[in-house]
Amino acid sequence: MTRPSGLAIYAFVYLAFLYLPVLFLPLFSFNDGTIVAFPIKGWTFEWYRQLAGQDTLIRALMNSLLVGLVTALFATSMGLFAARAYERYTFRGKEASEGLVMLPLVIPGIIVASSMLVLFISIGIKPSLTAVILGHTFLALPFSVSIMKSAFDDFDASLEEAAFDLGSGAVETFRRVTLPIVAPGIVASLLVTFTVSFDEFVLAFFLSGNQPTLPVYIWSQIRFPAKLPNTLALGSLLLLASVVLLVVAEYFRRRSSKSKI
Amino acid sequence: MTETNIIQLKGLDKQFGKFTAVSNLTLDLRQGEFFSLLGPSGCGKTTALRMIAGFQEPTAGKIIIDGQDMAGIAANKRPTNMVFQSYAIFPHLNVGNNVAYGLRNRGISKSDIEKRVSEALEMVELGGLQSREATELSGGQRQRVALARALVMRPKVLLLDEPLSALDKKLREQMQFEMRQLQQELGITFVMVTHDQYEAMTMSDRIGVMFDGKLMQVDAPPTLYAKPCNKDVASFIGEMNFLPAQVTAESGDSLTISTPGFGGMTIEKNPNIVQSGRDIEIGIRPEQLEISVSRPEGYDGTVQGKVRNVAFYGENVHYHVQVDGIERPIAASVPNYFHTVDYRPGEPVWLGVQAASVIDLGQDQSK
């Protein structure tokens, strides 16, 4: 080991500044007291235990799971077909359409959320889980498209031709060759898009109406100081779940780009 | 329709935008022959093969396979199967399932599939390897699986797109021999695309040479080697010395020519030449030249020169001899009988050639 350079110290301080606050969340969720401040008064699982008994929380969790699952399915199936088209074919307007698909990554959430609310109401979709699902699918699509594109990236096009040559039609070829080969990418995309939806707040806040998702529920609870430790516990669980999902997704994404021969 | 022509290509054209990949390709392939389409990369040979397979629609022209017009018939309905350049072995299936893939599209009973798969694997000497994973195969084994997977379908024509280019030299030579053997045993028509002239020559009954989307010449390898139809074909197949010559007299099948260095000779007219004239080019294969210290006896043409450099190939030695009045050195190849290089750079030597080995290449395009 060489002596740490100035750059290394800078990187360390920077990362600490970014992630230390996040680590306080789980730390204080075990604190035996309602005030979020040092010193820690004692250790307890009480806040976690209390979570289980809160009906509105469970309902919000179920809403989030439902929205996340449907969003993941929608975004991934759209991403799968879009990515295959982008990787296989050249067509007029290809670059423009790729750019448009990626746009949600850079548009401010509040703009998307308010304009979607106006749009949905004007076409008769009331704020509801359906509205949230549609909004989240829009937000998750760029993630799905880019993951699926990397899955198709080193997918030898002659594999599909070989299947076709051996007598399979387009649907058979897709089912027996394309789908199994990009399966790891699909799993990665499902997990990532689920996570995107599960953690999303702004859109859900605007569009969920009286069916709050988990982040919206958490926000509503922060107003009550007595419930803060519960919220911390819940937040810690969400953090853990997100990290696990993303790690698993990354594992599948790497596998999808390694399995080709 | 004739009984013996399994494939008839009639005036095939393929345009990609403004680029013409294949132009007016007309070709009859015989039942049971090993045919190679040979040419440099980008000459349209792969496009031609892909049109036969049904992966590409011709812009104009007809493809008739076994008497049936293929217009509007997709690749999955054609009686052809293909061995891809990348082999395209399905990575998620084991060897047995790769080979069985196509049979499962045909509603064949499970036991028949198993039987045919194991026969096909025996045929390519991979007997019993059904459960081997695709990812565990070596290059040569993948090539064999690709062959078995196509042949198990009992195609009327097997199409091969540069099937050996991914293999190393030793394995390539072995597979050339085995594939030729297999083709003769099965009696199936093989159509192979290759840019490797040796591969084409050693395996094929007939070779079609393509340049710039056009089919230049179709002939058996010995004819192609001895009577190329122009300079392009002559330089693509084997090595060739090109010399300018003037026709001084012409009678029936022979030409009397005068050429710098070697002087006057009467050579055979090349029947494959389209354009002839007074100024022609001639070709001499390096191995047809005698090289010696003194003027060789009994040769129709002789010339003196100086060894410029020596290339030792192992099985033979190439001497590049500079001759006064001839711009480029003349290559002469001598079999290596005694593991020796007999002439050193700078040494004066004589070259001798028989008129029968001088190839008429038609009008000199540079004049």
Image: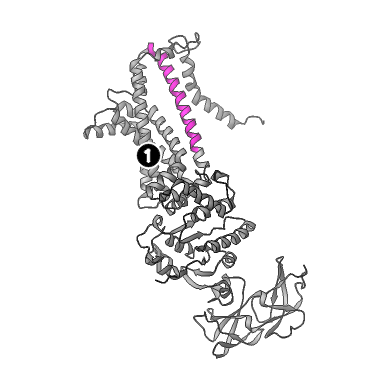
Q: Does the magenta stretch include residue A251?
A: yes
The residue at 27%/31% (across/down) is: A117
Q: Position of residue B89 (x, y in %)?
A: 51, 49
Q: Is residue B51 left or right of residue A134?
A: right
Q: Where is residue A187 in the image (x, y as percent from the top left)?
A: 44, 35
Q: Where is residue A24 in the image (x, y as percent from the top left)?
A: 48, 18
Q: Quadrant of residue B202?
A: bottom right
Along the viewing direction, whichever of B37 and B261 lies nearer the viewer: B37
Image quadrant holding the N terminus of chain A, namely top right
Q: Is residue B330 visible to the viewer in this orientation of the structure? A: no
**What is the image's colouring?**
one colour
Chain under numbered label 1: A
**Which stretch appears magenta?**
A225-253
Q: Position of residue B243 (x, y in %)?
A: 61, 79
In this view, B344 is above or below B159: below
Instruction: Give the secondary structure at mark 1.
Output: helix
Q: How many labels does the image show?
A: 1
Along the viewing direction, whichever of B264 and B167 lies nearer the viewer: B167
Q: Is residue B313 visible to the viewer in this orientation of the structure? A: yes
In this view, B325 is above or below B250: above
**Location of mark 1 (residue):** A77
- Label 1 sits on what residue type? Ser
Q: Is residue B286 left or right of residue B279?
A: right
- Graded by Cα atoms within 10 Å as few (under 14), some (14 to 19) or many (20 or more), the crowding at tag 1 reads some
Q: Does the magenta stretch include residue B313?
A: no
